[in-house]
Image (cartoon, rainbow, N blue to C red):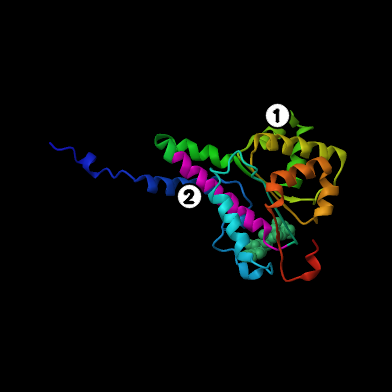
Amino acid sequence: MKDSSKSNLIVPSEDELIEKAIANALELLDIPYKYKDKDFDNFNIAKLTNKNPDLIIADFQKYAKNYIKNQRTPNWLVLKGSSGSGKTHLIIATLKESLSQAVAHNIRNNPNKHDRAYQNLARDFIFTTCGNLFQEIKNSYDCDDINERDVLERYKNCRMLVLDDLGTEQTSKWFQERLFHILDYRYGEMLPIIITTNLTTQELLNHVGERTFKRIIENADKGNNLYKLKTYNPRQNAS
Ligand SMILES: Nc1ncnc2c1ncn2[C@@H]1O[C@H](COP(=O)(O)OP(=O)(O)OP(=O)(O)O)[C@@H](O)[C@H]1O
Ligand SMILES: [Mg+2]
C-alpha cells in the first residue's frame, strides 16, 4: 500500500520558515505593550520638522538591515529629541528589524536549528529604560537569587541593548560608574547600543560624565550616528 502521509507532507520553504520564526521572535521580544505594533511603516515622517526627515528614517532602517554586517564595527546610535517626538517608536522599529535580520541570518546558516535559535535571540535583544536598569541593580542588593554582577553581565553581553530615556534618573557617582562599566565593556567588544535621551549634548555630558560621554561619541561613528528628532513645538527643540 502506498504511504499517503509522506506525499501529503508539505515542507515549508526556507523563506516560509524565516517568516514564521521572525513572527515568533517578535512575539517573544520584551517591549512595552504600547509599542508592540510600532514599526517603520507606521512611523509618520510628516510629524517631523527636520530638514530631511526621510533620510533620518532611512538611516535607521539601514542600520537595522545591516545589523549582521555592522557587528564588530563602531555601531552605536544616539537619538535625541523632546518628549513625544517619536524616539521610542523609532528605536523599537529599529530593534524589531535588527532582530528580524538576526533570525533570518541564523536560519540561513543553521536551517535545522531554527526553533531554538530565535527563542534565544529574542531574549538577547534587550529594550530597557535607563531608570529600570538602575532600579534592577538596586533591587539586586536586597535579593538572594540575583546579585549586581548577574544584572551587569546581562546588559554587558546581550547582542543588542536599547537604553531608552537616558537622563531621566538622578545622576551620581554610583550611577556613572555602573553606566561606564556596561558601556565600556560593550565599547571594547564592539556590541551595539541604541540610546535615546531628552537631554541636550551638554546636559548629556554632565549627566553621564566625561569618560562615558567620550565613549558614546566615539562609538556612535564619531558623531555621525547622533540624531535628533525635531517636532512642531519649538520650545522643546533646544540642541
Ligand atoms: N512620527 C511619528 N509617527 C507615528 N507615531 C508617532 C510619531 N511620533 C510619535 N508618535 C507616537 O506618539 C507616541 C509618543 O511617541 P514616543 O513614545 O515614541 O515619544 P518619545 O520621543 O519616546 O517621548 P518621551 O521622551 O516622552 O519618551 C507613540 O504612540 C508614538 O507611536
Ligand atoms: Mg520614549
- Percent x, y of residue 170: 85, 47
Q: Is residue 191 above or below residue 22?
A: above
Q: Which mark is residue 111?
A: none
Q: Quadrant of residue 138?
A: top right
Residue closest to the far left: 1
Q: Quadrant of residue 180?
A: top right
* Magenta span includes 63: no
Mark 1 sits on what residue?
145
- What is the CA distance from the residue labelled 1 to the residue labelled 2? 32 Å
Q: Is residue 106 above or below residue 41?
A: above
**Nearer-the-camera pick, 220 or 161:** 220
- Percent x, y of residue 132: 73, 45
Q: Is residue 80 above or below residue 173?
A: below
**Quarter of the image with the N terminus in it:** top left
Start-end of magenta stretch: 84-107
Q: Residue at x 39, y 35 (%)?
A: 112
Q: Residue at x 84, y 37 (%)?
A: 174
Mark 2 sits on what residue?
23
**Nearer-the-camera pick, 153 or 141:** 153
Is residue 36 visible to the viewer in this orientation of the structure?
Answer: no
